[in-house]
Amino acid sequence: MKIEDKKIAGILLMLCSSACFVNMSTLIKAMGDAIPLTELMFLRASLAVPLLMAALIKRGKPLVTKAWGVLLLRSLFGTIAMFCFYYALTNMPLADCVFLGRTQPLFIALLAPFILAERAPKEAWVAIICGLVGSLFIMRPGLDWSVAAWVALLAALSAAFAHIMVRKLCRTDDPGVIVFNFTLILALVSGLLCYKSFQMPSLQQWGLIAGISIFASSGQYLLTMAYGYDKAPAIAASSYASVVLSVMYGFFFWGEIPAPATWVGGLCIVCGGIWLFYSRMRCTDT
C-alpha cells in the first residue's frame, strides 16, 4: 500500500472508530446508574472475550502479545480512562462529556514526541486547533466544571497515554491480538472489583450491554488498526468528528438543544478534518 493510501486509511479507520465510541457512549448514558460502573465494565469486556478469542484462533493468530510491558501500561491507562469516562457520561450531558474527551488529541500531540519520538505534522496541528475551537463554539453555553467535568479531563489524559501505548504495540503485534489481550485484562480486573456487589441485569439492560460491548470492541479494533497506518497525532486529530455526532445524538435522544454557535463549531471541525485528510493524502514524507 502506498504511503498516502495508508494515511487515508488510518484517518478513515479512526472516523469509523469514533462513530463506534459515540454509539457506545450513547448506550452507556441510556443505561444511567442502574448498574455499577465496575460491573458494566466487566460485562462489556466479558461478552467480547470469547468472540475475540474465536476470531484470533480462526485466523491462526497468537493469543498473547509480544510486548507485555507495553500492554500492561496500555491496559492500566485504558481502564482508568474507561472508568472515568463512564462516570462522566452518567453525570453530565453527552456532548459536554465528548467535548472534554476531545482534548485527547492535544494531549497526544504533546506527549508523542517524548514517548514515540513522533512530532505532530503541521496538518495535524491545524486539525487539532480547528477541533478545539469548534468544540468551544459548540459548548459556548459553558460548563460548571463540576467533579464530573474534571473526571472527563482525567479520562482524556489517560486515554491519550493508552492510545500512545497502542501505537507502540502496533509495531510488534496484530491489532486483533492487542484488543483481545486488553479486553481480557479489563474483564479480569473489573470482575475482581465487582463480584461482591454483582446484580443481575434485566432483559432490557442485557440488550444495552450487548450493544455497548459490540460498539466498544469494534471501536477498539478500528482504533488499533488506525494507529498502525500513520503517526499518532495525525490519527488522533481525525477523531473530532465524534463531537458533531454526539451533539446530534444529544438532541435526538435527550432533547439537548444545541446553541446556534453549534453550526459554526461544526464547520470548524469539519474544515479541520477535511484539511487533515487532504494534507495527509498529498504528504509522503511526514
Image (cartoon, rainbow, N blue to C red):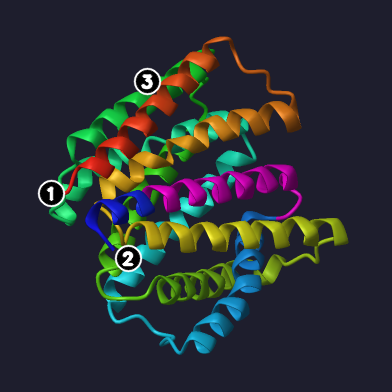
**Which residue matches tag 2?**
73
**Which residue matches tag 3?**
133
Q: Is residue 149 left or right of residue 171?
A: right
Q: Is residue 110 left or right of residue 78?
A: left
Residue extending farthest right: 203
Q: SS of the residue at dot 1? A: loop
Instruction: Name the amino acid type tagged 3.
Output: Val
Q: Is residue 230 left or right of residue 81?
A: left
Residue 74 image offset from top left, x and y in percent: 36, 64
Instruction: Name the amino acid type tagged 1.
Output: Asp
Front label number (1 vs 3): 1
Give the image quarter of residue 157: top left
Q: Is residue 266 left or right of residue 196?
A: left
Can residue 69 be seen in the rendering of this structure? yes
Q: SS of the residue at dot 3? A: helix
Gap in angstroms between the C-alphas marked 2 and 3: 31 Å
Q: Residue at x 44, y 86 (%)?
A: 63
Dot 3 surroundings within 10 Å: few (below 14), some, or many (20 or more)? Answer: some
Front label number (2 vs 3): 3
Q: Earlier in the sequence, mark 1 or mark 3?
A: 3
